[in-house]
Image: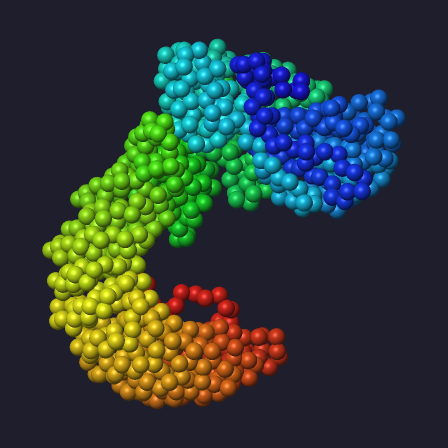
Amino acid sequence: MEKFSVWKNTLWPGEDGGLHNITQRSPKLISYLKPQTSAQSMPRTVVLHGPAGVGKTTVAKQLLLDWTQADQAEASKSAFFLSCKDLNHKGTCTFAELMSENGPDLQDAIPGILAQAWKILFIIDGFDELRVPSGALIHDICGDWKKQKPVPVLLGSLLKRKMLPKSTLVITARPGALRELRLLVEQPLFVEIKGLLELDRRAYFLKHFAEEAQALRAFALMRENAALFHMGSAPAVCWIVCTCLKRQMEEGEDPASTCQTTTSLFLRFLCSQFAAARGGCPSARLQAPVRSVCLLAAEGIWTQTSVFDGEDLRRLGVKESALCPFLDKNILQKSQDCEGCYSFLHLSVQQFLAAMFYVLETEEEEEDVGGHRCHIGDMKKLLSKEGRLENPNLTQVGYFLFGLCSEERAMELASTFGCLVSREVKQQLLKCRSVPHGKKPFSTTDAKEILYCLYESQEEELVEEAMAPVTEISIHLTNTFEMMQSSFCLKHCQNLQKISLQVGKTIFLENDTSLKSDAQVERSQHDHHSLHLWADLCSVFSSNKNLNFLDVRESFLSHSSVRILCEQITHVTCHLQKVVIKNVSPADAYRDFCLAFIGKKTLTHLVLEGSVHSDEMLLLLLCEILKHPRCNLQHLRLGSCSDTPQRWADFSSALKINQSLKCLDLTASEFPDEGVKLLCSTLRHPTCFLQKLSLENCRLTEACCKELSSALIVNQRLTHLSLGKNHLGVGGVKILCEGLSYPECQLQTLVLCHCNINRHGCKYISKLLQGDSSLTNLDLAFNPIATGLCFLSEALKKPNCHLKCLGLWGCSITPFSCQDLASALTSNQSLETLDLRQNFLGPSGVTALLGALKQKNGPLKTLRLQIDKSTTEVQTLLKDVKESNPELTIESNNARTARPLCCNFLS
């Protein structure tokens, strides 16, 4: 455990070296790992994983000590610690020689130890740092412990259980290596090592600062930066933060800006270590050392190396004397396990210095002499998705790189180390991270990544230039720091038109009843901070004149946060036209939104879905929106609404008064019989301007069809009607078709999917289509029409049939029925889209349809059906159809796209 004395002497201001809490919380694995009998078939493998510096090696060494404790009943137990960092510097050897690295005196005892492999524990520490080509560990395997092999081959053989298959293995690794480990080891137990938890970090700060107020202030600043706080699970990072902020406070400075970004904290820490060189006269003696250390850091990041030996230094042209200033400041450390080797204080420090490598101007004589930098990728590769997937350590380097491109930070680097910062970095970053015009909107993941990068820069001009092409963005907020990033960037995104927003559960705690009473003060402080940031973010709705679409869904808000957002929506400079509120809590948030929309002249599209069914006031408020003289609402979707007959009466009255609403979607709403009558009465009213109406899944019955049918006869404006997922049956369809057959009816699109329409119902539909009907789009998906297709086919043959789109998805159509349909396709003059997916048409049915299409170049543009392309006959027919019908597209996959017959509600 001597390796961790640095925690006690440097990083942890207490007496226990900071090890106690971590080892106490580590799982009680010894009972799981205890030596197995030789007859037991399944040896144990445990993978301890977590980010750098959180105590994986500490826990592994504790397990090693526990394994060899004398009070265990079993005797002659052996444990071996194999450090991948150190073994990178070892050449070819036997496995026996590898084991004797733990003690040269073991050489003679090894044959006896290996004879009882089930009593051996191997700790393989830092698997992610093993220098080996990808996949090499899997292919080259050796089972002979006397055979000379490269170290990676020996370790791979041990992990694959070819070497000493009965031994017990404990492997430590960072998260990026877990994918490869899953391919190597069989049935491992993965244990996450979290390092210092929040209470531990707080205790750390209290020990480091003499004054409690200063400690709590510093801790609060770190916690507000989620990225920095996450890094703080490593004691080394806590030490860096405490050291930096304590010095600032002692000098009378306000440390708030230092924790604003991760870059500013690490830059201030690094520069403060060389305070003597700061000011107007930077020391020239630091120029060469800082370049050398940055080169070493960058090389290590790209090769995933954290320990460097003399050979590494010679290859890179780095003199050991150049490292002295950084060794003196504990930024670089001499390895205690490997003579003549060096490592950085923590991975984050190495990543920061690697970022500096890209921003410091290089002297001409230093330009890659002898190919020293062949492993270091360029900035484009550093910021690419492929590069970061291959090497996760590059991600933080990219964040730091954006943070270092600001003018202010460039000056701080120059004044400290006497090095010039390249002016081209900013433009290079823009090329790598900006969004070309015409590109699809950001995904949520991409948006989070880019907002983080731009926020780190704190450069408003850079943000404006990078975000100029962005018109749509999706943001998923999981903490207040992401809210701060979003606010900073979106305020400088002037061409933004649409924001999709999802707010996580832990941001607003105001409505969280699960918190204990003693946490009330902390919750109040948290919410005060959160609401301040939220108000800043919401201000974009009143300040950006181009922003017209807000989509908030799957979000956990609070009463206060909803009111703040609504205040911005009601502002005269807010130009929102389309708003979607879906699955938002608290439930009464929908009321506040409706109050904000009353009199909102710019609002044309509104979607309210989620907990609306339980709000008795919602319909009343919607009535007020519709009746307001400034109402310009054209599209309204109200999902799963249920209310009293009186409320529906009020709603129907409001529809008669309103002259702007064109599209109404009441899907999954519960209507009393009186409610349907009132709605149909509205449709018959001369001042009703509705053109599209959806009553899907509203429990409509055959009786309701009578009301609808009479309304369709009178109403000449309604063109789209969706009645899907209602049990209408044959009787209901008959009644509807009677109303649709009147010449006054102007309906063009009718959706009747999942309506329990059978063969007999198709007779009435066929009769309607053969008359002078205005119907052009019909969706009959998921109705058991089966042989009823013959009636529909008969209608398609008639010249009076104007149907352009017919949906028969999953309608139990048989191969026999395809003959009738094929015959209809040869004479039909109007059908452009036919959907037959999820019907087993069989080879004969498909052949009949393709044969008909081969004969004639008709109006059909899109055919969707299930095809087995393996037969030669079908392949030939498809080719012939393509030649005779070049305009026809045949889609043969079964992935269901959006039903073409349903209008896009928000278009």
Q: Is residue 171 left or right of residue 892?
A: right
Residue 84: x percent and y percent? 70, 31
Identify the image quadrant of the N terminus: top right
The residue shown at (45%, 45%) is 445
Residue 310: x percent and y percent? 70, 23
Q: Identify which residue, 105 or 844, lies in the foreground.
A: 105
The residue shown at (32%, 32%) is 527
Identify the image quadrant of the C terminus: bottom left
The residue shown at (63%, 23%) is 343
Q: Is residue 511 left or right of residue 575?
A: right
Residue 382: x percent and y percent? 54, 38
In the displayed structure, 513 sits above or below 653; it is: above
Residue 663: x percent and y percent? 24, 64
In the displayed structure, 625 sits above or below 417; it is: below
In the displayed structure, 680 sits above or below 829; it is: above
Q: Answer with the quarter of the image where residue 769 lies.
A: bottom left
Q: Is residue 417 left or right of residue 858?
A: right
Q: Answer with the quarter of the image where residue 858 lies.
A: bottom left
Q: Identify which residue, 867 or 594, lies in the foreground.
A: 594
